[in-house]
Amino acid sequence: MIDLKYLQNNFEEASAKLQKKGVDAATLENLQKLFTSLKEANATLEASKAEQNSMSKLFGQYMREGKDITELKAKVDANKEAMVPMQEKAREAEEALYHVALAMPNFPDESVPEGEDEEDNVELRKVLEPKEFSFKPKEHWELSEINGWIDFERGVKLAKSRFSVLRGEASRLERALINFFLDTNAQKGFIEHSVPFINNSAMLQGTGQLPKFEDDLFKIDDEDLYLIPTAEVPLTNLYNDEILTEKELPLLMTGYTPCFRKEAGSAGRDTRGIIRQHQFNKVEMVAIAHPAKSQEVFEMMVENASDILTALGLPHRVVELCYGDLGFSAATTIDLEVWLPGQNQYREISSISNTRDFQARRAKIRFKDGKKNRFVHTLNGSSLAVGRTIVAIMENYQNEDGSIEIPEVLKKYM
């Protein structure tokens, strides 16, 4: 959640930042009205409390002086009764502000590039040169038909569109990649976790998927439970509503999970193949860091994901997202885009974000800094999306006859 005190005290500055992330003027105007309503309700309530305290002090004085307290008691009782609707009004005003604030995106960092959409993202560097093929490279679904790796039709039969089944060597490759990713992350200090693939609404609110993105989640009927869209949710919320010690930071976590997304806003996009599925596997990195160290951790996470792609021999580029393409919870994001020769373009394979204290405020994750409790910074990133890595290997390691080589680092896993 955004810092409401900062928003209230620096409304024009904060509003300009939120508008860069797509918040319209009418929403911001409504937010300002809610601040005013809460301020007025609290002021009225505090004045009544002050009056109550003053009258309460007179009881002792009247008793000492032998005065009749009947009239005073009647005033105190009447004021106490009058405070009840005042308290309710203040509570309602605070609740209304909180509800709207939950739908507000994070403030972007000052360093984030200007821009409206992915076309305005900034390429920072390229890693490895794409291979020159002596033939026209095929796309992964064509290669799948030759090798019998992916069964799209039976995936649809088992569930619906955007589900598929991996067979034989593809299934083994998936398992090899998961182990390789986890082992590499462990070497960088990330502790592996096996977490529930189903989380309750409080956890999804903590990391920012609820309430705004409920339409993109698979909910379990008659239960306050959802299938997770990413391991970011359970890994970050392991420390929901906890106070950590400064010595514990940073906490580095990794885990493999399937991820479930309705892809509600992607109708017509990537309908062929396994680039965009309702269920996909991913290995995630999550960090809970000291605010002064979060940028350092962020850069380490980007480097780690890039190193994995390099070890696999997959050409990729490192891209900084502009304001318009930045995610809801992110203050800054770096995407890694892998080269797909069959598609003749770079496609996102990892997105690494620093949310600063945005998720920590929602999830109440703090650390003890002397006598004061402060919010941590939380970070998350893919290392990597498994299905998209399989696609990248298929297309980059294909031979003219459609057969597929296996990257050297994976051979010991297969």
Image (spheres, helix red, strand yellow):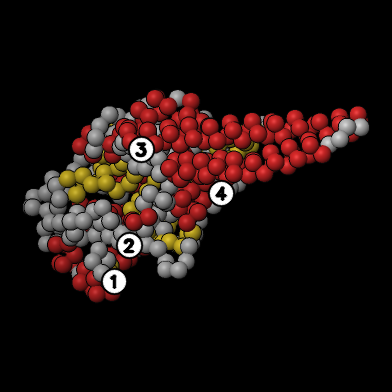
As helix, strand or loop, the secondary structure at mark 2 comes to strand
Q: Is residue 317 left or right of residue 292?
A: left
Query: In this figure, which residue is indicated by the disc labeled 4?
Result: 239
Q: Earlier in the sequence, mark 1 or mark 3?
A: 3
Query: In this figure, which residue is indicated by the disc labeled 1?
Result: 159
Query: Residues under labels 1 and 3: Cα distance?
Result: 39 Å
**Residue 53 placed where, x, y %?**
74, 33
401 shown above or below 305: below
Q: Which of 126/406 is in front?
A: 126
Q: Residue at x 37, y 62 (%)?
A: 218
Query: Residues under labels 4 and 1: Cα distance?
Result: 34 Å
Of the residues tagged 3 and 4, which is closer to the observer? 3
Whether residues under marks 3 and 4 lie with C-beta atoms below 8 angstroms apart, the answer is no
Three-letter amino acid code at disc 1?
Ala
Residue 62 seen in this snapshot = yes
Mark 2 closeness class: few <14, some 14–19, many ≥20 residues within 10 Å: some
Query: In this figure, which residue is indicated by the disc labeled 3?
Result: 27
124 shown above or below 351: above
Q: Which of 343/75 is in front?
A: 75
